[in-house]
């Protein structure tokens, strides 16, 4: 029988939760085993970033609204449509962090980090954007990203792209594609803007409403449109690469040469422009078909003018951001039929006396073994206990009942190969040694 607190009354929601409570729309809870996948990804990120020489930075969840208006761009979709902005009790306008780069620059300026020379930072944490929730896109989501400051040359672009590529390929996403483009700088981009306006203007009446606004405010964003009305004109738009000035072309050619030498394949995609105003020169995305239309794994590029626009010195910079929810969805879609390896031990006590004997053994195993030790303290039959062990993906079960108590030996069951052996439980030290020998 389950304990009384697990039993719901007729008509009562499961667990006794009132109907009007639940996670806010566009957010989600992470519970085991999903939280374990998050822990594994985050641990892998920490190791990878350290290998590349990056240190972690953590910034407040909310910042001054003006930081994002100035840093991201007043006419971007983020600032115009997606920010969670509120006034505090003193009337100051604050915004929940919609992206990480501007806060990272603010923190580096505040703590005088740029005075120390080139700077390599990475972050993991939530961002907040008010948009229509859909698969892989939430109002509270999480990003991993890196920011490399102080290097104007394409070597830094290669470093940042290599870090992202190492993570994606390290997870075995075999169809990952690196899409690369250059959007020039303030010297060559005005001529390209004029060319885009000349290209799209004759078709203004047939463009989407959003694109008709963009042609006046930021013509480059027209290339971002996925609206079916815009697609034919986007596909036939002139490529920016033919408008690059000599320094931008030299930078782009050098980056392509470095990628070739590093063995990182890439595709030139002239439609990549990125959605934030601070980008210039290199922009890139890594895509995969695992989730179909929602193909972007991560994206980034160079933003040499951002630090100066926020009141700092002239500091070149390049970075990327990866959406962690979507990345984990890709891994789950790829591994939909695969189960994780069994690991750890399920301690099973059959009866009150067995629980009394097994409890200190469990405590010692948890102090000694690196693999997890699971235990269920409710009165259940062996079959129910073994189902729990399977749910926990335990490799072994240590079974102790009245027969085992009388014999002084517990049953160690290999849950992968379905074989049993008897082990003495009178000496915890000997038992631990046997379990380590068995592979725990």
Image (cartoon, rainbow, N blue to C red):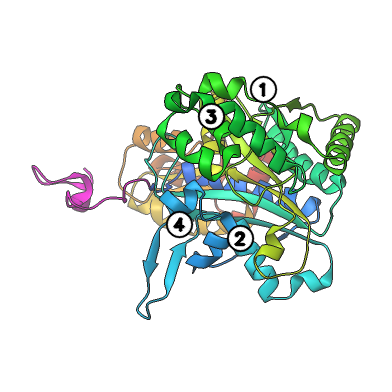
Asked if residue 410 lies in the magenta stretch, the reply is no
Kindly report the distance in space between the C-alpha atoms of the residues bearing marks 2 and 3: 33 Å
Kindly report the distance in space between the C-alpha atoms of the residues bearing marks 2 and 4: 52 Å
Q: Earlier in the sequence, mark 3 or mark 1?
A: 1
Q: Earlier in the sequence, mark 2 or mark 3?
A: 2
Q: Is residue 105 left or right of residue 140?
A: right
Magenta highlight range? 1-26
Q: Earlier in the sequence, mark 1 or mark 4?
A: 1
| Residue 418 can be seen, yes or no | no
Quadrant in which residue 266 is drawn: top right
Q: Which residue is mark 4?
A: 359
Q: Which residue is mark 1?
A: 175
Dots 1, 4 in contact, CB < 8 A: no
Q: How many marks?
A: 4
Please name which of the two marks, 1 or 2, marks the residue nearer to the observer. Answer: 2
Kindly report the distance in space between the C-alpha atoms of the residues bearing marks 1 and 2: 32 Å
Q: Which residue is mark 3?
A: 201
* Figure quadrant of the C terminus: top right
Kindly report the distance in space between the C-alpha atoms of the residues bearing marks 1 and 4: 49 Å
Q: Which residue is mark 2?
A: 102
Please name which of the two marks, 2 or 3, marks the residue nearer to the observer. Answer: 3
Q: Earlier in the sequence, mark 2 or mark 4?
A: 2
Q: Residue at x 61, y 30 (%)?
A: 198
């Amino acid at each position: 029988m389950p304990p009384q607190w697990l039993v719901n009354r007729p008509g009562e929601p499961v667990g006794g939760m009132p109907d009007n409570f639940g996670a806010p729309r566009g957010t989600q809870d992470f519970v085991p085993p999903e939280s374990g996948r998050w822990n594994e990804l985050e641990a892998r990120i920490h190791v990878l970033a350290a290998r590349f020489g990056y240190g972690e930075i953590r910034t407040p969840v909310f910042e001054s609204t003006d930081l994002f208006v100035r840093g991201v761009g007043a006419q971007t979709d983020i600032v115009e449509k997606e920010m969670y902005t509120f006034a505090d009790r003193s009337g100051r306008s604050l915004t929940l962090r919609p992206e990480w780069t501007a806060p990272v620059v603010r923190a580096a300026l505040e703590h005088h980090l740029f005075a120390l020379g080139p700077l390599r930072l990475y972050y993991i944490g939530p961002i907040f954007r008010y948009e229509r929730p859909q698969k892989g896109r939430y109002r509270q989501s999480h990003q991993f990203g890196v920011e490399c400051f102080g290097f104007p040359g394409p070597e830094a672009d290669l470093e940042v792209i290599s870090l992202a590529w190492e993570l994606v390929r390290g997870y075995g996403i075999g169809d990952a594609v690196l899409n690369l483009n250059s959007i020039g700088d303030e010297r060559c981009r005005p001529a390209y803007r004029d060319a885009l306006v000349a290209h799209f203007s004759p078709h203004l009446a047939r463009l989407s409403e959003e694109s008709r606004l963009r042609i006046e405010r930021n013509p480059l964003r027209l290339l971002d449109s996925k609206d079916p009305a815009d697609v034919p004109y986007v596909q036939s738009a002139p490529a920016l690469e033919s408008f690059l000035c000599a320094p931008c072309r030299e930078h782009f050619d050098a980056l392509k040469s470095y990628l070739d030498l590093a063995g990182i394949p890439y595709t030139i995609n002239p439609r990549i422009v990125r959605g934030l105003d601070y980008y210039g020169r290199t922009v890139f995305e890594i895509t995969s078909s695992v989730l179909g239309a929602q193909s972007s794994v991560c994206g980034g590029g160079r933003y040499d003018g951002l630090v100066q626009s926020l009141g700092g010195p002239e500091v070149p910079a390049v970075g990327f951001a990866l959406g962690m929810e979507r990345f984990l969805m890709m891994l789950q879609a790829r591994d939909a039929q695969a189960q994780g390896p069994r690991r750890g031990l399920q301690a099973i006590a059959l009866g009150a006396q067995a629980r009394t004997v097994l409890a200190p053994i469990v405590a010692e195993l948890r102090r000694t073994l690196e693999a997890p030790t699971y235990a269920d303290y409710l009165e259940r039959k062996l079959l129910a206990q073994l189902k729990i062990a399977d749910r926990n993906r335990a490799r072994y079960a240590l079974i102790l009942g009245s027969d085992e108590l009388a014999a002084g030996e517990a049953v160690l069951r290999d849950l992968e190969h379905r074989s049993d052996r008897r082990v003495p439980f009178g000496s915890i030290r000997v038992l631990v040694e046997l379990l380590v020998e068995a592979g725990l």
